[in-house]
Image: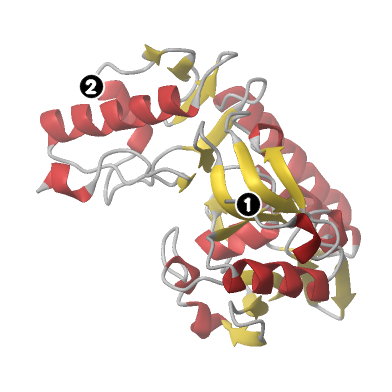
Amino acid sequence: MLMDPLSWPAGVRTGVKLAPFTTWQVGGPAAYFTEPESVEALQAAIATARQAQMPWAVIGRGSNLLVSDAGFPGLVVRMGNAFAAVTVEGDRLTAQAGIPCAQFVMAGLNAGLGGLEGLVGVPGSIGGAIAMNASCHGVAVSDGFESGRVLRPDGSVEIWSRDDFRFAYRHSRLHEEQGVVLEGTWRMKPVDKAEGRAEVLRLQQWRHAKQPTNVPTGGSTFRNPDGSAAGALIEAVGAKGLQMGRAQVSEKHANFIVNLGGATADDINALIGTLQRRVWDQHGIRLHPEVVGLGLSVGLGSDFFG
């Protein structure tokens, strides 16, 4: 049962469809939804959800996110423009969680700071990228990372060192502990602005040539297994171009699933499970989704793999 809206902090809305906030453009409504304008508003919204004993989740730009067609029966917090500032002090750059990764990279270059140009290929925001230790073009968010501010579920704000985050491949401590990244600080390298921008342009051109960028997609679907590439394994089992409903394995890069228009979360999830099953049956390799589910479990459960 929905709570009385008057018991929520200002700015919390009910029944907001989540599809427009995801890069796949699929998903049903959140029971409650807010884009807080301050840390205090964020704390108040989460405190209310916890008091009501309802689930809550935080999203950024909605990449690597698959939202159930039925939606999410709790509170969804979107870290938007109110959390998109960047500050520079010497060779240190601090970015709030809501800034898109590409803008983060360019903010550094505009200040003559680089080393993380590869992250221009990450479609999400920096908060989500920190939480999953996103990487692209051989560069990971954890490279040069010094510390981050994290909001804990009890409302406290902590400063975590790089070691506190326990970064690993596509992983951080936030996979085990619920919390909200508020900002991160990196120690950067001096770069020539023109050279840095030229490198960003080269990487963007590569991405447009090699990956689907003109259709809705969730980003890379699976982590690369040790010693293998997920896309190559999917091609090897003849699944490039495979379609279920209006969801299709990209013809350009097999580790991407695209929405051809009108796809549902069920279409995408069925396709993810089918790819896992084929690769497991033919190669004995388990593909682990990079995709996070909201209101659903992504792909096949652990029981399938024994």
Q: What amino acid type should be assigned to the residue bearing mark 2?
A: Val
Q: Is residue 90 left or right of residue 156?
A: right
Q: Is residue 114 left or right of residue 90?
A: left
Q: Name the residue beneath numbered marker 2.
A: 237
Counting residues from the start of the chain, the first of labels 2 and 1 encountered is: 1
Q: Is residue 277 visible?
A: yes
Disc 2 to disc 1, C-alpha distance: 46 Å
* Quarter of the view holding residue 12: bottom right
Q: Residue at x 63, y 20 (%)?
A: 215
- Bin the neighbour count of mark 2 within 10 Å (Cα to Cα): few under 14, some 14-19, many 20 and up: some
Provide residue 176's location: percent of width, then percent of height: 41, 71
Question: Contact (CB < 8 A) between labels 2 and 1?
Answer: no
Q: Nearer the viewer, residue 122 or 49?
A: 49
* Quarter of the view holding residue 185: bottom right
Residue 245's label in the rendered image is: none
- The structure's colour scheme is secondary structure
- Bin the neighbour count of mark 1 within 10 Å (Cα to Cα): few under 14, some 14-19, many 20 and up: few
287 up-or-down from 217: above or below: below
Q: Residue at x 83, y 60 (%)?
A: 84
Q: Name the residue beneath numbered marker 1.
A: 2
Secondary structure beneath label 1: loop
